[in-house]
Every structure is written in structure tokens, then in C-alpha cells.
Image: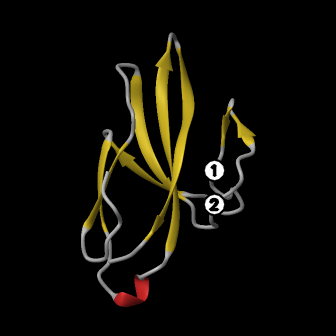
Amino acid sequence: VTLPVLGTNWLSTIATNPNTLAAYVAVGLAGPHPGPPLLGFELLLDPTVAPVLIPTAGTLSLAIPSGSSWRGLAIPTQGIRVDSVGPTMRVVLLNALDLVLGG
């Protein structure tokens, strides 16, 4: 994991396991949220606007714009994993990370 510095790539990872079918980084367009329960976990992104889901195989490299107008922008993110549990699938909400662009 790296800091979100302007003009660089932000690197992050999603914890996966042998049963992981898919992993995503969700970007909250409406901001962070205090954590209402959902699927036995906590949703840490504001659900009033659907988040953008970025698929990842566990490691993500996301380009951060270089313009100085981006400095200080806060971007809430949360990891999401889909695991195979026997014959069913389970959505696992992971930790959130609020990125503050800088540099």
C-alpha cells in the first residue's frame, strides 16, 4: 500500500483467500458512512449514491491525477470480496480507507 500522491499510482491490496471468486475496491461517490450493518459486516461508504466498483485480482494500481486542484480531495474506499462458501457465494465487506490526495 502506498500513499495517494499526486501524479503517481496508488497501490493497494485486497486480502484474498483460496475461496475468493472476485475482489473489488469500492469508491464512495457520496462520501464515507459511519457503518450500518450489511450482510453481517459494516458498510463504510454512503449508500445514497452507488459506489464505483473497481475489479482487482487482489492488487490494485490506480493513477492519481497530477493537477494541484486535486490536492486535499478526500476519496473514501472500501474493499469488497466475493467468496465461495460451499455451494453458495458470500459477499465480504472489508476495511475502509479514506484517501486524501496530496504531494
Name the spot of residue 67 as percent of width and height, x first.
Answer: 33, 87
In the image as oriented, which residue stretches furthest toward the right? 36
Q: Is residue 73 left or right of residue 58?
A: right
Q: Is residue 102 left or right of residue 41?
A: left
Q: Is residue 82 left or right of residue 6?
A: right
Name the spot of residue 91 as percent of width and height, x first.
Answer: 56, 32
In the image as oriented, which residue stretches furthest toward the top? 86
Residue at 39 percent across and 34 percent down: it is 15
Residue at 30 percent across and 57 percent down: it is 2
Residue type of the residue flagged with mark 2 = Pro
The residue indicated by pointer 2 is 32
- Front residue of 67 and 20: 67
Residue type of the residue flagged with mark 1 = Leu
Placement of 11 over or under 22, stated as above or below: below
**Where is residue 102, by image quadrant?**
bottom left
Name the spot of residue 26 as percent of width and height, x first.
Answer: 50, 53
Specify the label residue 78 is tagged with. Answer: none
Which element carries disc 2, helix, strand or loop? loop
Placement of 63 over or under 39, stated as above or below: below
Placement of 42 over or under 33, stated as above or below: above
**Where is residue 68, by image quadrant?**
bottom left
Residue at 62 percent across and 58 percent down: it is 50
Q: Quadrant of the C terminus?
A: bottom left
Q: CA distance from mark 2 to mark 1?
A: 6 Å
Placement of 1 over or under 65, stated as above or below: above
- Front residue of 51 and 15: 15
Disc 2 vs disc 1: Cβ atoms closer than 8 Å?
yes
Specify the label residue 44 is tagged with. Answer: 1
